[in-house]
Amino acid sequence: MSRIANAFAGGKAFIAFITCGDPDLETTGAVVRAAVENGADLIELGIPFSDPTAEGPVIQGANLRALRGGITTDRIFDFVRKLREDITVPMVFMTYANVVFSYGTERFLSLCRDVGIDGLILPDLPFEEKEESLPVCRACGVDLISLIAPTSENRIAMIAREAEGFLYLVSSLGVTGTRTEITTDLGAMVRLVRENTDIPCAIGFGISTPEQAKRMADLSDGVIVGSAIIKLLEKYGRNAPPHVGQYVKAMKDAIRN
């Protein structure tokens, strides 16, 4: 069983998104460890990009802080290599196609394999254009994780049939960020996914409270939380790890029950 499949094997998965280098890599490492110790089943590591089109103001701010702090893709690869010495849960990168292409797709993915990255999420890579990256991903054993949005409609079945790792279901239209209410008919989306694949699906975008997490986990195989974690980093900076740990525990407890 792959590490990603394993993350969903023990019940509903909690996936924590953390921007690398916000405010620095040392803090990122401490936050990852705090999240894992408190029940995170999979870690999504954001590689900062200057124009993160899928992100709302919270994660955009994290990208800018990390880039101002001198973060580079090379430093992130070194960081993950060290992280893998004691972190065994699956880790995936979330970044933008331009980051991968400018680094060199084959070089980027072979390094993902070498440092122990299990998957790659590129929100700006259209499904129809993934064939350019897919063979390299497969050769390196890195799952190219597909996103399904409320606007995917008649493409949901097709995307689901070709999915790898897990499916990222986008809960709402627009960019990432916490929301008071999620109104999309996610149940219908999940049913269509289930008819076409056995691969687990996790819901992200806009989830911030234990109540929302529970509702989303009741519909799917797991929940993805980013902005609410980044807000804690923005508020507490280098002192954020225990606060993130406490938050992750509350979220994991909510989806476990």
Image: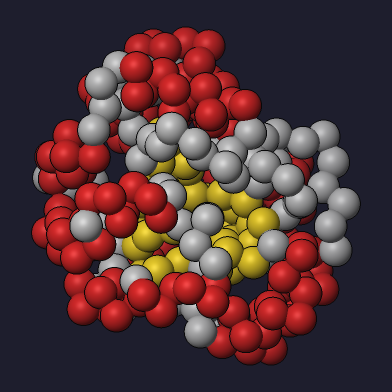
Whole-percent x, y for residue 18 in the image? 43, 36
On screen, residue 242 above or below 94: above
Whole-percent x, y for residue 131 in the image? 41, 79
For the question of whether residue 236 can be seen, the reply is yes
Colouring? secondary structure
Classify residue 204 as left or right of residue 134: right
Classify residue 239 as left or right of residue 114: right
> Which of the image's four quarters has the N terminus?
bottom left
On screen, residue 25 above or below 84: above
Whole-percent x, y for residue 21 in the image? 32, 26
Whole-percent x, y for residue 85 in the image? 12, 45
Q: Residue at left 23%, top 50%? A: 103
Q: Residue at left 51%, top 39%? A: 52
Of residues 102 and 226, the one nearer the viewer is: 102
Of residues 101 and 222, the one nearer the viewer is: 101
Of residues 159 and 185, the one nearer the viewer is: 159
Residue 147, quarter of the rendered image? bottom right
For the question of whether residue 9 can be seen, the reply is no
Of residues 45 and 223, the one nearer the viewer is: 45
Q: Residue at left 37%, top 60%? A: 120
On screen, residue 238 above or below 123: above
On screen, residue 209 above or below 155: above
Q: Residue at left 30%, top 17%? A: 69
Q: How many marks?
A: 0
Classify residue 154 as left or right of residue 220: right
